[in-house]
Amino acid sequence: MVRKIIVKTILNKHRRDSWFLDDYSLNPYEACAFNCVFCYIRGSKYGRNMQKSLSVKVNACRLLEKEISVRMKREEYGFIIISSSTEAWQRIEEKYKLTRRMLKIIARYKFPVHVLTKSTLVLRDLDVLKEIDRNAFIPQDLRGRINHGVFMTFSLSTLDEHVSKIFEPNAPTPAERLEAMKECRKKGFLTGVAYIPVLPFISDSYEELDEMIKTAKEFGAHYVFVGALTLFGACKEIYTAVLKKHFPELLPKYRRLFRIFNQPSK
Ligand code: SF4
């Protein structure tokens, strides 16, 4: 049973992210049914059972209309990342179409978008995303450097289907995500891969890094972000339990790696 919640704000402004270039974040849902073991939002209140905590922000469209119109009047254009702490195209989106409705609002106000997804359902919305890609106002300081109103970034942590099933149990397979990216590239989008998080001792060998970058290129990626695993709170406990079950030989290495910090040191 999906919870319905009322939220106070929806378009969250933050300091620009130097990788994804987003000035705003937008999360239509709370928590996430893809239930990735390494998901950093497990470190928050949704931690243990993200499927159970899954909620629809039922007043999201009304709020977005209000908040984005204020930003537009002030000419505060900036990339909106969809999504930073949920999957905007998870299965319930088929029913609620909340992300699609929000994209239509964004298209009307001509804000640019950075899509960050593991889902093939995003292909359903390429028509609206194309409109945004063509018409969005790029922030003043990025004009001339970026000539697309949409980035389409597909998130992958491994190319190995078996490993993916362990760590990203409800997400589409890596091959399905790559095919979706290829489709976006064919439609003329700026496309890329977020190889985040790279899983220590599981998907982080030089060969795997090479293979990921080579494969991403083959499937049409213009860029690849590579980022480390962060483990804290419930996320650390759940990840450790999964290691214990599937990769027990790695436990001492992880203990050393995450003994002091939440991330492996550089
Ligand atoms: S898809 Fe993203 S938000 Fe959802 S569980 Fe996985 S990492 Fe977390």
Image (cartoon, rainbow, N blue to C red):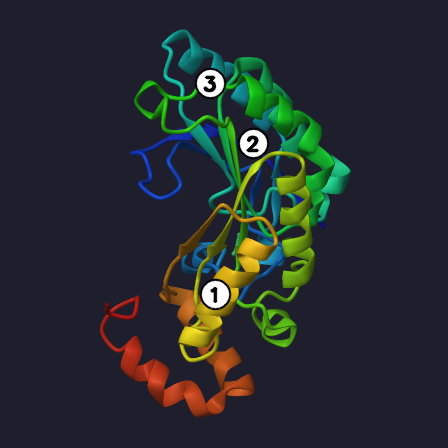
Residue 224 on image: x %, y %: 45, 53
136 vs 144, left or right, is right
Which mark is drawn over residue 67? Answer: 3
Q: Alpha-carbon distance for marks 3 and 1?
A: 32 Å
Q: Quadrant of the C terminus?
A: bottom left
Residue farthest top in this picture: 73
Q: Which of pointers 3 and 1 lies earlier in the amino acid sequence?
A: 1
Q: In what element is the residue under mark 3? A: helix
Foreground mark, 2 or 3? 3
Q: Quadrant of ligand 1?
A: bottom right
Q: In what element is the residue under mark 1? A: loop
User: Is the residue at mark 1 in contact range of ligand 1, meaning its CB lies under 8 Å from it?
Assistant: yes
Residue at 35% from the left image edge and 89% from the top image edge:
252
User: Is the residue at mark 2 in contact range of ligand 1, meaning its CB lies under 8 Å from it?
Assistant: no
Q: Amino acid at mark 3?
A: Glu
Marks 2/3 in contact by CB < 8 Å: the verdict is no
Q: Quadrant of residue 162?
A: bottom right
Viewer-side residue, 133 vs 243:
133
Disc 1: which residue: 38
Disc 2: which residue: 6
Whether residue 65 is visible, yes or no, is: yes
